[in-house]
Image (cartoon, rainbow, N blue to C red):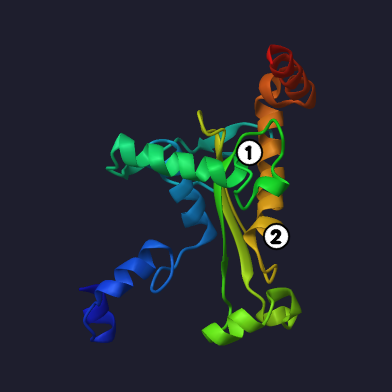
Amino acid sequence: AWKKQRYGQEWSPGETLSCAIGQSYVLTTQLQLANAYAAIGTGGFLWKPHLVKYIESADGRILKEFQPVMLGKVNLSKKTLDIVHKGLFNVVNDPRGTTYSVRIPGIDVAGKTWSTQVIGLSAAKLRSTKCENMPFNVRDNGLFAAFAPPDDPQIAVAVITEHSCHGATGAAPVALAVIKTYLQKYMPEKYSDEAIKARKAAEKGKK
């Protein structure tokens, strides 16, 4: 119905496949993407984003504080969520995952990398020209979205690095650094460098 109204054309079955992997008519801001990953991490609960936590006066009195507002819940079965969670976890933690080489040991993250074209290129052009060898302004943008920790999400992050070619080497290191900083600040008992070192030593002792 949307395509018929917008373009006066019928929807084709192949477009459903393209949209399912984020191509075709799918458009999203980074905030929408972060919020989507937050919902995936929390089992489908969608919360209203706020840019400001509270407003205070010059003398430090809190004039207005913004409370969490739930927008709704995405109805996904536990089986489906478990499959998605496992896939996102493996992207970062499995040796075959695209983000494995830049993961931060001791900081478990579930996420996904991808890239977006900034100009239209033929399939032949894409196959014959390495992104890094293209002019900077036409290189793909790198993206990475994630939540952490996977078993008890506290933070969701979405990063786009313009013209970095790849999400794994461009966007993921930025997002992982943000996640590490956040977890070490608010959960130091588990994610400080000392806590991670002690946990690794304990795990090594069990082997």
Q: Which mark is residue 101?
A: none
76 displayed left or right of 93 = left
**Percent coordinates x, y for residue 69 in the rendering:** 39, 39
Q: Nearer the viewer, mark 1 or mark 2?
A: 2
1 relative to 20 in the view: left or right = left
Q: Residue furthest front?
A: 207
58 up-or-down from 164: above or below: above
Q: Quadrant of residue 54?
A: top right
The CA distance from mark 1 to mark 2 is 40 Å
Q: Quadrant of residue 63?
A: top right
What is the secondary structure assignment of the residue under circle 2? helix
Earlier sequence position, callout 1 versus callout 2:
1
- Above or below, 128 against 106 in this view is below
- Residue ID at (46%, 56%): 32
**Do labels 1 and 2 touch, CB within 8 Å?**
no
| Residue 121 appears in view | no
Callout 1: helix, strand or loop?
loop
Residue type for callout 1: Ser
Asked whether the viewer can see residue 37, the reply is: yes
Write down the residue under mark 1.
Answer: 57
Looking at the image, which is closer to me, 202 or 73?
202
- Residue 207 x, y percent position in the rendering: 69, 16
Residue closest to the eye, 5 or 134: 134
Residue position marked by numbered label 2 in the rendering = 170
Q: Amino acid at mark 2?
A: Gly
Residue 78 sits in quarter: top left
**How many numbered tags mark residues here?**
2
Which quarter of the image is occupied by the N terminus?
bottom left
> Residue at point 32% right, 73% down?
15
Q: Residue 139 appears at what percent x and percent y?
A: 67, 77
